Structure formats: structure tokens, C-alpha cells
Image: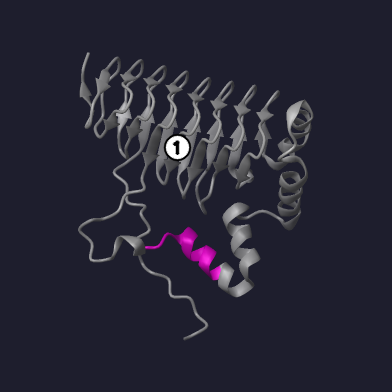
Amino acid sequence: MSNDIEVKTDETNEEAQFKVKGRKKGGFATYRALVYGDQSMGKVILGECLALFFGGIPGALGLLLRAKLYPLMFPRIGRKVIFGRNVTIRHAHKIRIGDNVVIDDNAVIDAKGVNNRGIDIGDDVYIGRNSIVYCKGGDIKLEKRANLSSNCQVFSSNDLTIGAGCMIGAYSYLLSGGEYDHKSDVPFADQDGMETKGPCALGANCWLGARVTVIDGVTIGENSVLAAGAVVTKSFPANSVVGGVPAKEIG
């Protein structure tokens, strides 16, 4: 029927839900589903007002106002959390933040999903400028003192953990899920891109140089070093030093 939505079998429940809401209720319903999910209209209005009136205020005044007002969006947030300018928060009701966290300018924190837990950010975590931490039905955990430099991307449609004290260099990319089926007859553009080999995890106290890529299903043991530019396609044990494309033991 012309007024119905055709839901492809390879779409996630989340995507189908967004399409149905958007078609039945208009563009605002789609926006609300993508940005706020299952939150009350009061929370939607609060989020919009905070972003509009306080998100871009520069200097110490902006930091102070956001530190006082942004916690109203979250189910759990610790003390002394700093939000930089123009930080984008989506699905705040599934984001939990510890003490002394810094989220720098233009970062994106998005816990999108229908049945997922969302994002847990531990104490003393730093998320650098322009970095993106986002879910598409998956979960992400940044453990205590994890540090993401600028322009990093962390994505999960499964489960992704960055261990305590990890240092992630600029422009690095970590993902759990997000794969396409190259054997399928369905064109890539029509797939949901949520195929996964399993969770992705970095053990505690790992150091990733700039532009490191860690793909779906990879586990890196604690105290490991991944050299700049490495593309890590398989798991390595604790205390490994790896580099190259694809990455291999180098020390």
C-alpha cells in the first residue's frame, strides 16, 4: 500500500522504528527518535534549550553554565564534569558519566539504540576535540582515565571497551560491528552495515599512536603499544608491541 512503510529484513529494529515514526508523524518525530529516543517531551525541550542557549557560549562563563546545567540531561553524572563548546549529546538518558570528566569542543556522544545499555564514561576520562563516541544499537565503556585525543572515532553496534588508563592518539578509529556482507546479493547501500564478528576491547594501559585503526572483533591485551598508522585486524596478547598494515608483532 502506498501509505505503508516497507521494512527490509536486513534493517535494524531501530532504523525501522525511525522510518515509521518519521513517516507517520513527520520530520520532527524522526529528529526526536534519532536525537532523543524514548524520552519525554519535557526532556526533548530541555535538551533543545540547553544546546541553543548554552552550547556555544565561549570562555569561562560557558564552561560554568554548562557544568551547572548539562547534568540535568543525564541519569547519572559525577562531580566536576567539563563540557566544551558545541558538544553534541544524543540519547542522554543512556549515557552515564563519572567524576572529573572532560568532553572537549565539538565532541559527539551518541548512545543511539533501542535495546542497548548505551555509553559508560568512567572517572577522569578525557574525550578530545572533534572526537565522536557513538552507538548504533551497541554499547561502549570508557574505563577510568582513558584518554581520547582529538578527532578520534569510537563506534559500536556490539560491545566496545577501552580499558583504564589507555592513551588513544589523534585520528584513531575503533569499531565493534559496522561490517557489510560482501557475499550478499543485497547492494551495500541497502544493507544496515551492522554485521559483527564480536566485541572489541583494549586492555588497561594501552598506548595507540596517531591514526591507528582497530577493527571489529579484535581484543588487545593490557600494557600493549600499537604504533602510529597500524591497522589491527587480529587480536594480540598483553604486553604486545605491534605495527604495520596489517599490524604484526614488531617488538
Q: Which residues are magenta?
A: 10-20
Q: Position of residue 208 (x, y in %)?
A: 38, 23
Using residue 93 as the reference point, say whether residue 224 is left or right of it.
Answer: left
Residue at 37 percent of width and 41 percent of height: 176
Kindly identify the residue that appears in the image at 54 percent across and 45 percent down: 111
Outermost residue toward the bottom in this view: 1
**In this picture, residue 138 sits left or right of residue 250:** right
Residue 48: % across, % down: 72, 51
Relative to residue 147, is residue 159 depicted above or below? Answer: below
Q: Quadrant of the C terminus?
A: top left
Q: Give x and y (percent) for residue 166.
A: 44, 21
What amino acid is labelled 1 in the image? Val
Determine which residue is flagged by label 1.
154
Which residue sits at x=62%, y=33%? Answer: 105
The reply, left or right, for residue 215 in relation to residue 246 is right
Q: Residues within 10 Å of mark 1 (few under 14, many from 20)?
A: many
Asked where in the image residue 60 lies, by quadrant, the reply is top right
Q: Quadrant of residue 69?
A: top right
Residue at 49 percent across and 26 percent down: it is 149
Is-magenta flag for residue 131?
Answer: no
